[in-house]
Image (cartoon, rainbow, N blue to C red):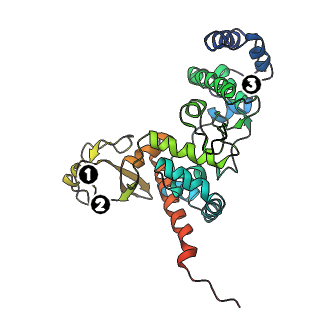
Amino acid sequence: MSPGLVVAQALDPGRADVAAFIADVASRHAFEPGPLAATFAQVESKPAILQAIARPAERALTWTEYRAKFLTDRRIARGVAVHAQRRAELEQATRSSGVPAEVLLAIVGVETFYGENVGRYRVADALATLAFDYPPRSPFFRGELEQFLLMAREEKLDPLGPLGSYAGAMGIPQFMPTSFRKWAVDGDGDGVRDLWNDWADVFASVGNYLKVHGWEADRPVMLPADVTGADLAGFEFGKIGLPETVGSLRKRGIRFDSSLPDATPATVISLPVGFGNEYRVGFANFHAITRYNRSHLYASAVADLAQALAAAVAAPASTPPRPAR
């Protein structure tokens, strides 16, 4: 186990740090201390969660390797099936957010394989373990634990019920509690925001998240770029953001096929492939996806999966049926 980690123990609501947290949350948010302590008495601090978060990072994948993990025939086929089953929910979310159905599908396809892998840990266990027994990020996870308790009360959920990832990400789209409270949406108007079972809520929430973070309807996510002979001096490829414009990139000599105005914010993404790099230009919609997960590889995989899903969904209508044998 990495240095600085506290050995996991059964969570004790009488522990000084836990008791102080319970008292603080109860005081500031009008929880009854007794029932809150009773809930914490049933929370478990799990060594497997500490081992998962402390696990050494995998070696950096090339774009080719990373893309191959998500652009599989099975993931595309499953996305097409979900599209057919949930067309009404997708269309409604697209109308309200401006985010195309294939992008909504691609997000949940990458995150949880369309809900097949939503996580196996109780969210309360995951967040409490990291809040009290993982010092490197304790403040962050205590904040998320507080938000989770508020969320459970607002949504009338048993706080010991919801399942998620080892880091406390929840449901089909893997929202953290803070994101849930801010941006989850009741897509079907039934008075509940259910990101585990209700696809209308899932797609509406993903669409709302991207819209709030700058999604621009009817604009591209990214485009292929040719940087041969371009001036790339001083450009920081790994940074998240849109430091350039369409016009400034063209002045650098970067070539890409777009009719967007010169003032359109943009960036260049360098994706490692083998012994070289693949280059693309990203726009506001690319940046919105990086707000979901701060990784250029992630956002590029979502963009490519969305493109593949759109093509696969359209294919049956344009491909004549094969004659029966």
* 80 vs 303: above or below: below
Is residue 12 found left or right of 149 in the rendered image?
A: right
The spot of residue 65 in percent (x, y) is 53, 56
Q: Which residue is mark 1?
A: 246
Between the C-alphas of marks 2 and 1, the distance is: 9 Å
Label 2 element class: loop
Q: Nearer the viewer, residue 213 or 223?
A: 213
**Residue under numbered circle 3:** 45
Q: Is residue 257 above or below residue 170?
A: below
Residue 124 as seen in the image, left or right of residue 54: right
Say which amino acid is labelled 2. Ser
- Are there few (<14), some (14-19), or many (20+) residues within 10 Å of tag 3? many
Q: Is residue 273 above or below residue 316?
A: above
**In this view of the protein, which residue sits in the foreground, 17 or 147?**
147
Residue at 47%, 46% in the rendered image:
289
Name the element at disc 1: helix
Q: Quadrant of the N terminus?
A: top right
Q: Name which residue lies at 41% across and 53% down.
A: 271
Residue 278 in view here: no
Q: Which residue is mark 2?
A: 258
